[in-house]
Amino acid sequence: MKHVKQLLGLITGHILMLVLACSIFAQTGAVTFVHDPCIIKSGDYYTLFSTGNLIEMRRSSDLQYWHRLDPVFQSIPEWGVQEVPGVSNIWAPDIFYLDSTYYLYYSLSTFGSNRSRIGLATNKTLDPDSPDYQWIDRGKVIESNPENNYNAIDPNVAKDNEGRLWLSFGSFWSGIKLIELDTTTMKPCQAAPLYSIAGRSGVGAVEAPFIVFKNGYFYLFVSFDFCCQGVNSTYKIMVGRSNEITGPYSDRNNVLMTSGGGHVVIEGDERWRGPGHCAVLPDGEESWLVHHAYDARANGVPTLRIEKLIWNEENWPVVDNAMPVGGEKQSSIPNAFVLYQNYPNPFNPTTNISFYIEKPTNVVFEIYDLAGKPIKTVIDNKKVNGVFKTKWDGTDNFGQFIPSGIYICTLKTEQHRISKKITLIR
């Protein structure tokens, strides 16, 4: 019995270490029905704002467990009701801190229309228990109307290297715009020019900009394709970079973002559909990609997701530890070519496998038995750079279920080959 208790203690301790090791990747608490999140760290807490119920607020001390606070607004500002007929909610906030004041930008619109307004509210603190806590609406920041070729929603504020502030915004129409802000009013400078920094011809599905400066570049994150359709959402997060905040921004293949450029940072998988509308949170030496995705295991509920961002040798942002919530932490900083251990392992009936490639190339992912006999070709096509996920259901190339045992999964490109053992239990 003593040995059994010792063994149980070791197992319990091991499980605890695994939980602690991966806890940052398993958001819990009030993490559902989160849409268009933005985030800021203030003191010992992280505060998250999102679309829904007149701008929802959530708080966490560790980026993992979140609890709700009261919403920012009690009602839609009257000026917005007058200027945007039919408006029923407040969308897509962005939070910025400057000179002891928190600036919350927000969107007023109706779905599919560019009769839109970006507004501004301020607060001296984000602590609801403080006597100084009070949101004060500052009115309209910028507008768009049917005669304009842009849409004034999805705001984001960024600072350039000279301390000047800029507002990026946009959704569909002619794409993402940028305008300089007056640091006194935090609204556009008088007669400030409007820059175009990203766009797509045809469908025009580009929105939700977020600009961050790192490693000598301004990085422009945007969302391509379609949100708000539950498990059918096709959102994905794209990125380009520029030496200047006003652009031009281009992707790693030197395609201009004003011409549809941008390469994938993260896209949907079997469970987490349509990841998008991101914010990037610098936090000491680390950076986090904060976004929503639609959970296919919960009928497409929009859910908060937080992934670690790293910058590779070419100074491009890459999602690290892209895996299901609650999964085992599988990687440190990826090199040019990484095959992560499958999860779960052992498995039955299916297992998930993630891999990272730094450059576009043809990828072959195959399953072999221990004698080296090919069992299943899971992937054989060209992939762009980034983290990818696939799964294996324990069948061979003929769709027949294979017996329990240890198998070898092998990832191959033109320059690399890497293998891992996986265990199937029937």
Image (spheres, rainbow, N blue to C red):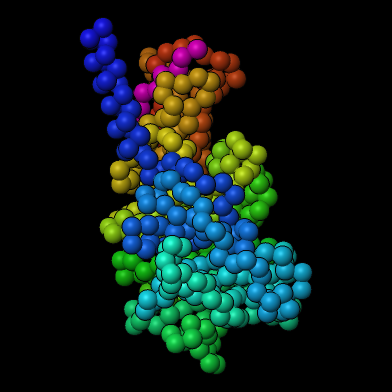
The image quadrant of residue 14 is: top left
Q: Residue at x 56, y 46 (%)?
A: 32
What range is drawn magenta here? Answer: 416-426
Tell me the quarter of the picture where residue 59 sits: bottom left
The reply to whether residue 193 is in sight is: yes
Residue 355: x and y in percent read 41, 39
Residue in the picture at 46% in, 39% down: 325
Examine the structure image and report whether residue 170 is included in the region drawn in magenta: no
Residue found farthest to the front = 131
Can residue 361 be seen from the camera position used here? no
Q: How many marks?
A: 0
Q: Is residue 216 left or right of residue 323?
A: left
Establish if 12 lies above or below 51: above
- Image coordinates of residue 408 in percent, x first then y, are 39, 23
Horizontal relation, residue 170 to residue 388: left or right? right
Question: Looking at the image, which is closer to me, 84 or 380?
Answer: 84
Image quadrant in which you'd find residue 215: bottom left
Q: Position of residue 55 (x, y in %)?
A: 58, 62
Q: Position of residue 236 (x, y in %)?
A: 55, 53
Quarter of the picture containing the N terminus is top left
